[in-house]
Image (spheres, grey):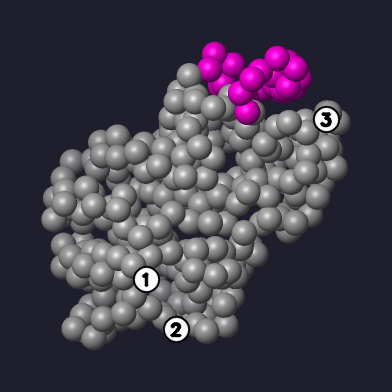
Amino acid sequence: MLKSFKQKLVSVDKNSFKQSALELFRYQAVHNPVYSLYLDLIGTDLDNINEIHKIPFMPISFFKHKKIKTGHWQEEEVFESSGTTGGPVSRHYIQDLKFYQQVTFSIFHSFYGNPEEYVLLALLPSYLEQKHSSLVRMVDFLIRRTGSVHSGFFLHNEEELIDRLDYLQRKSRKKIILFGITFALMDLAERFNRVFKDVIIMETGGMKGRREEIIRQEVHERLIESFHVGSIHSEYGMTELMSQAYSKGDGIYKNPPWMKVFTREITDPLSIDNELGYGALNVIDLANFHSCAFIATEDLGVIHGEDGFEILGRIDNSDTRGCNLMLN
């Protein structure tokens, strides 16, 4: 079933999403031991789940304490979160790394076109020091797909990065992306005031405890002022998800056809219906067919239409809130 689902994932659209999601839910409800036990503990009647908004979402914190797998297989890779709080890290066991790369390519291509049209420079401190970062894996794959000798990672050589950007703006016929962790881009902006009007500045990852947390709009305003660009792009992804979403300058993330984002009540982690349009975010990522596709995140956001969402922040004390029936 998993092999069949992998093959048809790329053909999922808004018309087939419901059927595919319910099909995968019924399979994971039986063949994913952790998710199955969770559904049993919260008293889920599987026969009553006939709409996607009725599907229970598994708390994302389970990835910190349990091995989340659907079926029996040997992992090819294990993605680990940054663990900036000093507590346990999330681990996402990846069945097929090549498939992760295919998903990454398909999503990037749908938003930005072929990576070969770009030079991609990456500023990912804290992530580069990790051995199993999904973000580094994703960006490294895209860098290699650009085929450019000028693409690459930068860690403690910010002056070289600035010089490279200056050079590429003058000489490169390709489009340029600077992909950076939010706090690192903020540091760069404060050290160097340069005109990068021809560069796509893409931020992700937040402050990671390195700087004071501020709202994304203020982050973008500061970066726009320092780099003299028209807008700031953003990427939304996490260790526990196979897929990514992108915002192309308006603050609204768009997700691929096989991924949908919903909101739940902040004070009730088991709530399913939420007609307010804002709250804590639940994500269905059908590319997570090998782990768990139905994730209750610790992010706060607003839904915009059928395939758009905005990130507002994080749930306070998220590591200690929510359902912890299986954490001991």
Position above or below: 128 against 6:
above
Magenta stretch bounds: 148-175
Is tag 2's residue or tag 3's residue first in the polypeptide sequence?
3
Name the secondary structure under disc 1: loop
C-alpha span from label 3 to label 1: 45 Å
Foreground pick, 150 / 240? 150
Foreground pick, 138 / 206? 138
Q: Which mark, residue 195?
A: 3
Tell us which disc is closer to us: 2 or 1.
Answer: 2
Tell me if 25 is positioned left or right of 15 in this view.
Answer: left
Q: Is residue 160 magenta?
A: yes
Foreground pick, 257 / 193? 257
Q: Callout 1, which amino acid?
A: Phe
- List x then y, in percent, for residue 97: 30, 36
C-alpha span from label 2 to label 1: 12 Å
Q: Does the magenta stretch include residue 273?
A: no
* Residue for point 38% across, 78% down: 53
**In the rendered image, which quarter contains the C terminus?**
bottom left
Q: Mark 1 points at which residue?
A: 57
Is tag 2's residue or tag 1's residue first in the polypeptide sequence?
1
- Based on the displayed image, in which of its 4 quarters is residue 122 positioned? top right
Task: Check whether the beta carbons of the residues at disc 2 and disc 3 lie within 8 A of each other.
Answer: no
Tell me if 236 is positioned left or right of 1 in this view.
Answer: right
Name the secondary structure under disc 3: loop
Q: Name the residue under label 2.
A: 273
C-alpha span from label 2 to label 3: 46 Å
Residue neighbourhood size for the residue with mark 2, other residues' Cα within 10 Å, grouped as few (<14), some (14–19), many (≥20): few
On the question of residue 328 being in view, the answer is no
Task: Check whether the beta carbons of the residues at disc 3 and disc 1 lie within 8 A of each other.
Answer: no
- List x then y, in percent, for residue 73: 16, 45
- List x then y, in percent, for residue 317: 58, 67
Foreground pick, 82 / 254? 254
